[in-house]
């Protein structure tokens, strides 16, 4: 981290010299400008976000007062100065921000401040949360003026940020939840209705492309939408995504050929990726971090209901109303959501202070075009190769090999571009500094583990227990329900406990235990035990995914919310694709080995060919061959779950060393720090740059 030692330290030294609580016997201590350089050599944490930097870049020198007394004196003194007649609330906010920002320079030892951040801080909250003219500083949020926060109307308290009133927030939030619900519904209806659609177009061999096209575009566009929202604000990417999704959905309902339908699904994916990403980002912009968990639980409810309804109703609607109405019924609510977003989402939401008055063309000059192109190309080709390899085409097919080769070449190129770009679309420092690197990678490997289980358990039910596809689907609903309940509970429990680490560790432990216990299942085991073992990993997902999202928001500055959200969602999507592709590769290779070893008899080759082509053929085999094939599938699935267990262990190892602050500590520090740096600092690169001190 690089500081520019100019006017900023002059102001800080004056503030420090006159700070309440500095008596004569402390006058011999060095000033901020004298000791700021030494702070770089005394870091106690590996995290380097601007938020935690205020509390972790701490110089060490002795003070006559204890650390707690020094910090308390500064807070109480700041509260005492509130009553002066010549100091406006805005001036006080700036002073409070500087006091907290530079409190690390007032003789607090690193270990003491570290302990203070991680323990109960009632004294600190009493000082920081005192009101200014009746407005609470931490829990009460901001003051909204008028229904639209435009300054016209009567001032009133609101727990939300961005100057929005309570009414305006709920109109925005309900619209975002509606968009999420429809996107989740649309993303899962293909699971049960694609046979009807492909039969209508007489293109059963193209069924895989219905899901692949949607997945390709939705995943690739997520980071692009996040970074665009930092440049032009949150509203334009959200509106653009909703328009694309609405147009793509209408196109699906009217498509007259399989090629046209696949292109429409790709357009739906673009809109879905932008809508989902922007919904999460806007929610984080408006909701304070200390109550963000509650609203994450609402999101989890909507996500679970939309996904479940899509799977359950997709086939029924295709059989009764016709498959075109699956998409047609989405158009009216999408138009309503689009209108609501256009009216109520603030125009400047997400724009930093120095960009509010910039023109669109001026703002776009700083956009990372090279990084966006390379990232989109690389991620698209990776998903394309993993989705089609071993499924639509063999792994040796030229299309698969070419896509993988371009991805391999684009990876180092992307790293080089992002390292040398002032405003990267995917900052490299997110992957090199804990705890955010641990959170992103644990999220990634968790998605691999979870989807390896979800993809292969239906094979176990159908190939080993010889159940029908319908029965195996119903078995999965038990684990899905368990995961949804845990996901909904996590947000509320985080808000209640104010602690962020417990869902990470608990979720990672369950994700590790899930595949570990599944290595013991066989066709004779009680179905109750099998369903319990299957539910473990889903429960882990319910704890860890919301916990990871909350944790990475908590250790990131407000200016970084969009980029960390889109990065986290991109890596989770990549983990989903890799989990399915990698587990399928392990299963198929193990199956070749075990079928050759277990199957014996004069019709061995014919039996192997049949069961590799269709799992349903196992039921019609002679009992002698059927038992051999079942044993081969059971052994192959055990090998797959062993591999998933190893990946799950990586998740656990990544989250155990993480140290997370409490929400009730981090919220007031973030708020005060952001006030004093709002007009001075740009957090879009790993090095803090002082804007108004640049030459």
Image (cartoon, rainbow, N blue to C red):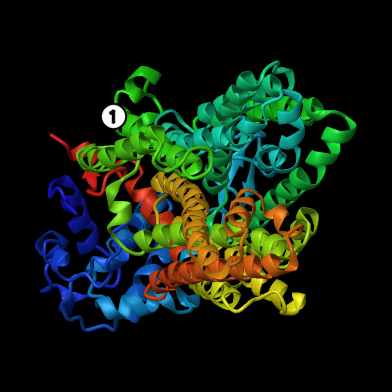
Where in the figure is residue 114, as x and y percent of width and height? 33, 76
Residue 55: give x, y in percent of width and height.
31, 66
Circle count: 1
Which is nearer the eye, 596 or 651? 596
Q: Nearer the viewer, residue 264 or 335?
A: 264
Residue 403 is left or right of residue 589, and the answer is left
**480 w.r.t. 343: above or below:** below
Q: Residue furthest right?
A: 320
Q: Position of residue 54 (x, y in %)?
A: 30, 61
Looking at the picture, tell me which residue is in the foreground, 601 or 596. Answer: 601
The quarter holding residue 294 reads: bottom right
Residue at left 30%, top 23%?
365
95 with respect to 527 (left or right): left
x 17%, y 75%: residue: 60
Location of residue 597 with respect to 163 vertically, above or below: below
Residue 61, image x and y in percent? 16, 77
Name the residue beneath numbered marker 1. Answer: 370
Which quadrant holds the C terminus?
top left
Q: In which quadrant will I find the N terminus?
A: bottom left
> Can residue 494 be seen from the camera position used here?
no
Please tell me whether mark 1 sits on a helix, a strand or a loop. helix
User: What residue is rendered at 51% in x and 29% in y?
Assistant: 237
In the rendered image, is residue 114 in sight?
A: yes
- Which residue appears at 27% of the width and 61% of the height? 102
Query: Badge 1: how crowded within 10 Å, few (<14), some, or many (20+)?
Result: some
Left or right of residue 475, residue 534 in this image: left
| Up-down relation of residue 5 to residue 104 (above or below) | above
Extreme residue toward the front, this view: 602
């Amino acid at each position: 981290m690089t500081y520019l030692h100019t006017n900023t330290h002059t102001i800080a030294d004056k503030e420090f010299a006159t700070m309440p609580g500095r008596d004569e016997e402390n006058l011999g201590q060095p000033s901020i400008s004298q000791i700021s350089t030494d702070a770089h050599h005394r870091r106690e944490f590996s995290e380097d976000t601007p938020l935690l930097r205020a509390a972790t870049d701490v110089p060490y020198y002795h003070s006559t007062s204890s650390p707690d007394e020094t910090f308390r004196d500064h807070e109480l003194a700041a509260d005492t100065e509130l009553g002066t007649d010549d100091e406006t609330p805005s001036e006080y906010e700036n002073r409070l921000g500087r006091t907290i920002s530079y409190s690390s320079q007032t003789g607090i030892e690193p270990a003491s401040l570290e302990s203070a951040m991680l323990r109960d801080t009632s004294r600190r909250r009493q000082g920081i949360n005192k009101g200014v003219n009746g407005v609470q500083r931490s829990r009460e949020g901001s003051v909204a003026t008028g229904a639209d926060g435009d300054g016209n109307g009567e001032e009133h308290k609101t727990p939300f940020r961005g100057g929005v009133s309570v009414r305006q927030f709920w109109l925005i939030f309900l619209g975002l939840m509606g968009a999420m619900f429809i996107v989740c519904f649309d993303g899962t209806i293909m699971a049960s209705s694609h046979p009807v659609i492909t039969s209508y177009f007489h293109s059963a061999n193209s069924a895989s492309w219905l899901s692949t096209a949607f997945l390709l575009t939705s995943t690739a566009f997520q980071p692009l939408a996040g970074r665009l929202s930092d440049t032009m604000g949150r509203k334009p990417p959200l509106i653009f995504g909703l328009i694309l999704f609405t147009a793509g959905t209408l196109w699906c309902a009217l498509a007259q050929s399989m090629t046209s339908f696949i292109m429409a699904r790709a357009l739906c994916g673009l809109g879905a990726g932008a809508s989902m990403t922007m919904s999460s980002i806007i929610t984080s912009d408006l909701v304070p971090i200390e109550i963000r968990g509650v609203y994450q639980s609402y999101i989890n409810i909507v996500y679970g209901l939309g996904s479940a309804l899509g799977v359950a109703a997709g086939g029924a609607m295709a059989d009764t109303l016709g498959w075109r109405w699956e998409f047609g019924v989405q158009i009216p609510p999408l138009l309503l959501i689009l209108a609501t977003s256009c009216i109520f989402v603030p125009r400047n939401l997400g724009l930093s202070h120095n960009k509010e008055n910039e023109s669109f063309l001026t703002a776009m000059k700083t956009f990372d075009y090279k990084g966006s192109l390379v990232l989109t190309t690389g991620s698209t080709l990776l998903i394309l190769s993993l989705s089609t390899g071993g499924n639509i085409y063999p792994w040796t097919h030229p299309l698969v090999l070419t896509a993988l080769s371009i991805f391999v070449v684009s990876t180092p190129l992307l790293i080089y571009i992002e390292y040398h770009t002032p405003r990267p679309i995917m900052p490299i420092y997110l992957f090199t500094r804990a705890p955010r690197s641990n959170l992103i990678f644990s999220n990634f490997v968790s998605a691999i583990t979870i989807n390896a289980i979800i993809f292969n358990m239906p094979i176990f039910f159908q190939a080993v227990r010889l159940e029908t596809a319908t029965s195996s689907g119903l078995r999965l609903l038990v684990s899905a329900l368990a995961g949804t309940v845990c996901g909904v509970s996590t947000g509320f429990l985080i808000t209640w406990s104010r602690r962020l680490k417990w869902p990470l560790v608990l979720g990672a432990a369950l994700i590790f235990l899930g595949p570990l216990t599944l290595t013991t299942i066989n066709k004779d085991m009680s179905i109750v035990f099998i369903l319990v073992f299957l539910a473990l990993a889903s429960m882990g997902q319910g704890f860890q995914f919301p916990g990871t999202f909350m944790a990475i928001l908590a250790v990131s500055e407000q200016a970084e919310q969009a980029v960390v959200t889109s990065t986290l969602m991109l890596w989770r999507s990549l983990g989903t694709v890799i989990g399915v592709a990698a587990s399928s590769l392990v299963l198929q290779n193990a199956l070749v080995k075990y079928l050759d070893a277990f199957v014996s008899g004069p019709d061995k080759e014919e039996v192997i060919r049949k069961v590799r082509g269709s799992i349903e053929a196992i039921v019609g085999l002679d009992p002698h061959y059927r038992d051999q094939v079942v044993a081969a599938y059971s052994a192959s699935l055990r090998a797959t779950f062993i591999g998933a267990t190893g990946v799950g262990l990586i998740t656990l190892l990544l989250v155990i060393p993480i140290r997370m602050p409490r929400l009730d500590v981090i919220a007031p520090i973030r708020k005060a720090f952001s006030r004093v740096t709002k007009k001075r600092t740009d957090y879009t690169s790993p090095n803090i740059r002082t804007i108004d001190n640049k030459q």
